Image (tube, rainbow, N blue to C red):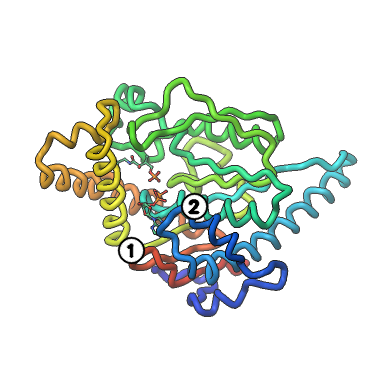
Amino acid sequence: MPELMNYNCYSREEWSHFHGQYFHNITDADLEQIKSVDDEVSLTDVQQIYSPIRHLLHLYLLNYQQLSQAKAQFLGQKPHKIPFIIGISGSVAVGKSTTARLLKVMLQRTYPQYKIEQITTDGFLYPNQELQRRGILQEKGFPWSYDNQKLLQFLEDVKANRHPVAYPSYSHENYDIVANQTNLIDDPDILIMEGINVLQLPQNQQIYVSDYFDFAIYVDADPQLIEQWYIHRFKGFLKAQQKHPDPQNYYYQYLQRPPQDVMAMAHRVWREVNYKNLVEYIAPTMSRADLILHKTTGHVIDQVLLKKY
Ligand SMILES: Nc1ncnc2c1ncn2[C@@H]1O[C@H](COP(=O)(O)OP(=O)(O)O)[C@@H](O)[C@H]1O
Ligand SMILES: CC(C)(COP(=O)(O)O)[C@@H](O)C(=O)NCCC(=O)O
């Protein structure tokens, strides 16, 4: 973990005291619901790490709502809802989507009256056919493999309350954008957007994705651990195919090949694509986050860094 002078760094124990008085402790019913997000999520993490994050987000949200109202008054406009957007960044397979789902469940239980949505920027990748046409299929996930204009327009439409707003989705199982499927975001109070690229500064553009964020989180870990998590997820997709083979599934092709060759290929893809992307384009964006969650073995969060100013 590099030294970042503009952050305060807290151990897990120190951070666990910041849960505040706003909320009751996490109840058994909360935990039950959280377990439905991911069986493997540690409930100690929920109590010690996520409960203080919920408290912090509550403060940001209150402040945001007050400022939005004051701004509308200043402009002589009727106060109106402007969605609060939380961005979550970090390496491929570091646990962004698990973190996003967990936060969503916790926030939804805290604010049952709010509509909370979650999306991933994976859907804004160009389809494989277009990546191939551009000769960048082996660079999936790199900044230029996304339709950044479409991503920015999506955020602009959500913030401007133009609803419902359509967005595309990506399937890890098919390894491609899902064709002919439109998903809708309709009038959210809070939107959680996760993706490897959300804190990047694209060239030739004046607006950045993070300009639309009201709070940003970066999930960090030692790359050697992330490689293990990537391989674990890869094996999970393979196992699912062994159980229920489906010729349309991207991982089906690997069932016919010697397992050691397949695993060597997965490690090579990690090294040559995802690790390269992490070092060159993702990790350098870490210091744009308001909060950094540092994970160690077994996805345990051992340190939390909060931006000072
Ligand atoms: N807190 C956690 N506890 C246990 N396993 C986790 C946790 N977070 C993520 N994982 C596992 O790590 C892998 C990568 O997580 P995922 O959320 O898919 O990452 P990302 O969205 O960053 O690519 C998945 O197999 C997931 O089940
Ligand atoms: C679609 C992704 C760019 C995004 O990854 P995510 O953050 O969803 O894990 C990544 O899973 C990916 O497909 N990378 C290309 C190399 C590969 O792993 O096959």
Kindly state the secondary structure of the residue where label 2 is placed. loop
**Side (left or right) of 225 relative to 126:** left
Image position, residue 182 (x, y; %): 53, 25
Callout 2 amino acid: Ser
Image position, residue 192 (x, y; %): 57, 47
- Corner quadrant of residue 295: bottom left
Image position, residue 44 (x, y; %): 48, 70
Q: Residue at x 64, y 70 (%)?
A: 25
* Camera-side residue of 128 and 58: 58
Q: Residue at x 46, y 31 (%)?
A: 147
The residue carrying mark 1 is 222
* Camera-side residue of 247 and 4: 247
Q: Residue at x 49, y 41 (%)?
A: 120
In the rendered view, tell whether residue 103 sits above or below residue 195.
below
**Side (left or right) of 255 relative to 25:** left
- Corner quadrant of residue 176: top left
Quadrant, the C terminus: bottom right
Q: Residue at x 23, y 44 (%)?
A: 269
Residues at marks 2 and 1, CA–CA distance in whole angstroms: 27 Å
